[in-house]
Amino acid sequence: MPTSASNHSLPPLLRDPLRLRRQGRRAAGVLQSLTPHGPLYAAHLRGHHGRKRAGSGDDFWQFRSYMAGDSASAIDWRRSARSDGHFVRQYEWEAARDIWLLCDLGPHMLFAGEGGEETKAEHAATLTVALAHLLSKGGERVGLLGQSERPIAGKYGTDLIAEKLVQAAAAPPVDILSLMPPGRGTQTIWISDFLTPVQRLRARLKALVRSGTQLHMVQLIDPHERDFPFAGRILFEGPSRTNGHLIESAQDIRTRYLSRLEKHQRHVDGLAKEAGASLLRHVTDVSLSPCLIALNAQLENPMTPL
Amino acid sequence: MVTLGPLAFLNPWLLTALAALPVAYFIIRAIPPAPKRVFFPATWLARDIDAQSAQVEATPWWLIMLRLLMLGGLIIALAHPILPPQQRLASEGPVILLIDNDWSAAPDWPARQDALLAFLEQIEAQQRLTKLVLTAKPVAPMEEPEEAEFYSPALAGERIRALKPSPWQPAYDEALTAITETLKDTDASIFYLTSGINHGKAAPFISAMSALAPLDIAEMGDAALRQIGFAAVKPSGQGFDVLLIRREAAPALSVSLVASDTGGAILARETVLFSKDQSRADATLVIPAQLRGRAAKLSVEGARSAAATYILDARSARPLVGLIDTPSVRGNVPFQTPQFYLQRALAPYASVERGDIAALLKEGPALLLLPDTGRLPSESESALKAWIDQGGLLVRFSGPAMLASSDAQQDLLVPAPLRSQARIVGGALSWSSALKMAPFADDSPFSGLQPAEDITVDRQVMARNNTLAQSQIWATLTDGTPLVSTASMGTGRIVLFHTSADPQWSNLAISGTFVEMLQRLLHVLGPSQAAPSAGARDMSLTQLIDGRGSLTAPPESLAAKLYASPSTKPASPENPPGLYESQNTRLALNLASAAGPLSPRSALRPMQKAAGALEIREVGGVLDRSLQPRVFALIAVLIVMDAIACLLLRGAISRPRGSLAKRLLRPATAAAAFVLALVLVSPQTQARTPAQLAENVRLACVATGAAKIDALCLSGMDGLVRQLNLRTSVWTGQTQVVDLADENLGLFPLLYWPLQAAQPALSAEQSANLNAYMRGGGMLVIDLGAGVEGNARMDTQLAPAELLSDLRSKITFPPLSPLTKEHVLTHSFYILSRTPGRRGDGQLWLEAGGEEQGATVSPIVLGNADWLSSWANVQTNLPGYSGGDGRRDELAVRFGINLVMYALTGTYKADQVHLPALLERVGRGD
């Protein structure tokens, strides 16, 4: 009996949308308690972003001389009183972003090393829900790539995402290549372990980037995958389960495994750089909060104006 | 059989297989244990690494050793190792197996049988013949094999298995004759398994045998501990005085003496202690008086033998008391004759017979009671006197009749001549007040009893000239005058109560002290030991005490015989111990009886004394012991160890940090869940019994015949039930669909009927059943809108007219009126102003007059709002999230809860309707 995820049955978290939602919100709530002031969802994962041009918004952008066609109510009388002309107050155009979440729940994600509490898939799902929660609180429109038709703003969107994640977990895994690509101007957060052969990964990364989205990658790795703490005569079974791989003395191949893993990770780094995507690594034995904070920083990065 | 050092093997050739063990070593070495299976998604990363590490992990050496040990052990076990006896038998050739099978061998009889069978197995292995000789005659005669012939030990073994110990003493002479017969023309040795007790005459028996042939005597090890017997049993005031004897020269021992009734229920228990080297012990078994009549058997716990069993008969358990009828002027009126009081006092403890003197004397009573009477007719008097002379006990009570006759002629049957006048100590014309009883003297048979404080004596008869000696007085009043006096007459005795046996002269007769005194008289003086008058009668044996002390039906040969006065003879094959019966007598014969074989004088001497120079050996030392079972047990342990080791190697049991418990917990949880699922699922699949239905409050849907509607109804009701259980203290069971013809309709407080336009007409049975249901307090909810497609807000019509008219013809409807704001239904849990369902604010019709105080519960609720769909909706949606019609669904649920509350609590909340008026009145302060 190898690991808790050896049978293909889903962990309970991925079967119960309510529970998933609760856990996701809790993860988001930890972040909230960490932030120093106020109801800081907006401060942390902000939704409305100044577009550096005049438009509808809350923040002052500029005064401009009155032109024919401007409504009388648009005149800022206080400013106008200071001089002879009439001035109109303009605001910075603020708009919510569309953020796609792409959560990998394939069979290779259903792994938790011995003694591990949660599988990578559970971590990924929790992270997705927490992100969706925080982002939609911040006013962003959030969608689940491959599941949602379009990103939706508001609390309802988060609730839908938990349910859709559960549906996706139960359904056979979908290849990213077959998904409708996210559009231009969107941001995509891709949560996976990226422990797939490099060629395969490159193809999917390209397909995503080609659509014009700004990509953020979050790599979830189990401590067992990082450390390879096995010893003895072991039959390793991959996600396909068809033919195992018998290692007579697992402790002997540890160093070679680790070097290969390191090489693979370098490849992944290279791919991310190539695609202009940010890459965040997270090991599943620590809490999600640092990951969420780091992601926030990534999303806050200045982006190309439309 | 081959002997190897201290061991011997019955199948030694199998040991050659041990030579194959080195081969097995290499085979076991070559097969490594199964690998541990690990799910690891990143397996592909390590896929082509293994080429360099082809080194095979070998089976650990300790596992190889374990398996070799297992294999070797198996071979050795199959070779059947035995430990040969430390001591050899005296000779070769045929063996006469002489067995003590009397009662003293009974306590450990099964162990004896085992030892004998082991011995027979051993001599069978040595290919010797044998013959059984028993010292005591068996109860059921053994089928005798051909005379004097030796036979195979296997045949002897069969006999041993069938043999039971006999409940009497051994007859050494007969056994010696049999042995002499057998030895006439053969050379055989004798093996004697003795019980270890010399029943007398054993010494000449043994010396005669040892002169005839080589003799081995063996004995069971701890038999002595349980060879205990009754030597004497004497009924006493509180129970029984018992003398127990046991084998001499044995260590200290404490045993339990118990009295049980015919059903085996234990009535009393007493611990008896034998100190070291003490072979007899006295004990008093105290049995509560009420239980004493039930005592049927005394036995020693743990010593199962005929000697350790003492059955009781009427003589010891329940004495026969004769109560002499005296002519009475008042006739036989209860509460007015002394006989009544005496009978009531003694009936629990004795068999009381009433009759005239001649008839009673024939019964052989232990005691005769003679209430107040004058001078007896001379023939009766002399018969009575003769009976007393022979040891009878006569108890007389005084009274007016006695006084009346005492002038004329001197009564013979009194302890002392009496005065003709009663002494009146209390009453209107005397100075003194009534006297109380003095405490009993120590030498009185009543000593230890406490006379009740409230006993007073008004009158008593007095001895003329105070001729009573102090020793003759057993009880006195506080002024020292006698209350009970006695005199011996021949070997018997007369006891006189100086007051009456009825409440005329004293309230003694209605006190508990009177009962206790009579009880003492029954036992302290004891029944006369004279043989029952039915001495010469022939009796038949109805129950036999078998060798192990149980009462059994006797075998044909014993039951068929008639026995003359069995109780006077010793227990023997001719007079087996047990219960004998004739028409109205029942006698017990025990091993312990006056005639023997066990009596206070007998002793159980060890056999060693009789054996002289011959050594008596422990039987275990003479037998060989098979080691095969032990080796097999060892192999079983090794197999378990091997299994655990394999699991450890495969990783099924993980060694570190107690996650074993967690892993074991998981299958346990699964099993528990499975059982729970069975429990939960099974009632759904099988029809429920009325009892199951009645366990919980259950709601029901009326079967419409349309599967879709039924399913809708069930899901709707389930939704409602869930909300009910969540929000109210109503705890409802599983909803179910019932047919209207179901006889258990009455068990559902509420029936929901999603009535369809396509409803088939009700059968006569269904309508009768439904009418009965509604009459009997059930509530029928008819929903005409359930399951109707389309937006029904449009049609306001209640129902297709023809459907309702059809129903009206079948069902007795009360007059209906629309639901008003004042109706109890709107207040029974929530306060509602509307009752919307999926189809809008459907109007609701109920029995007219429901808003009045004290109105009955409407048996019918008619509506068309399709609440079911709303209820089902609430169930399927997540709590907190409401679809399009959240408010409406919530109101529908509230209505449903009100409906159930209304069905369950009726008009309990009717006063709530008037609450506004009440509050207003309070506010006004009047």
Image: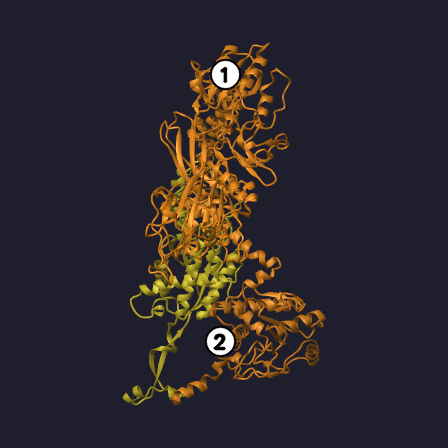
Chain colours: A yellow, B orange
**Residues flagged by tags 1 and 2 on a common chain:** yes
Location of residue B239 in the rendering, given as x and y in whole percent from the top left corner: 43, 42
Identify the subunit bearing mark 1: B
Q: Which label belongs to residue B829?
A: 2
Q: Is residue B792 left or right of residue A282?
A: right
Q: Position of residue B486 (x, y in %)?
A: 41, 43
Q: As displayed, is residue B421 above or below residue B845? A: above
Q: Which residue is mark 1?
A: B205
Q: Quadrant of residue B698?
A: bottom right
- Mark nearer the viewer, 1 or 2: 1
Q: Earlier in the sequence, mark 1 or mark 2?
A: 1
Asked whether residue A43 appears in the rendered view, the answer is yes
- Which amino acid, mark 1? Phe
Q: Nearer the viewer, residue B526 or B601?
A: B526
- Determine the secondary structure under disc 2: loop
Contact between marks 1 and 2 (CB within 8 A): the answer is: no
Q: Chain of mark 2?
A: B
Q: Which mark is residue B144?
A: none
Q: Nearer the viewer, residue A205 or B187?
A: B187
Farthest residue to the front: give it. Answer: B408
From what the image shows, is residue B115 above or below residue B398?
A: above
Which quadrant, please, contains the C terminus of chain A? bottom left
**In the foreground, A197 or A88:** A197
Position of A185 relative to B367 (above/below): below
**Residue shown at 70%/73% (left/top)?**
B758
Q: Give x and y (percent) for residue B259.
A: 47, 40
Percent x, y of residue B469 = 35, 42
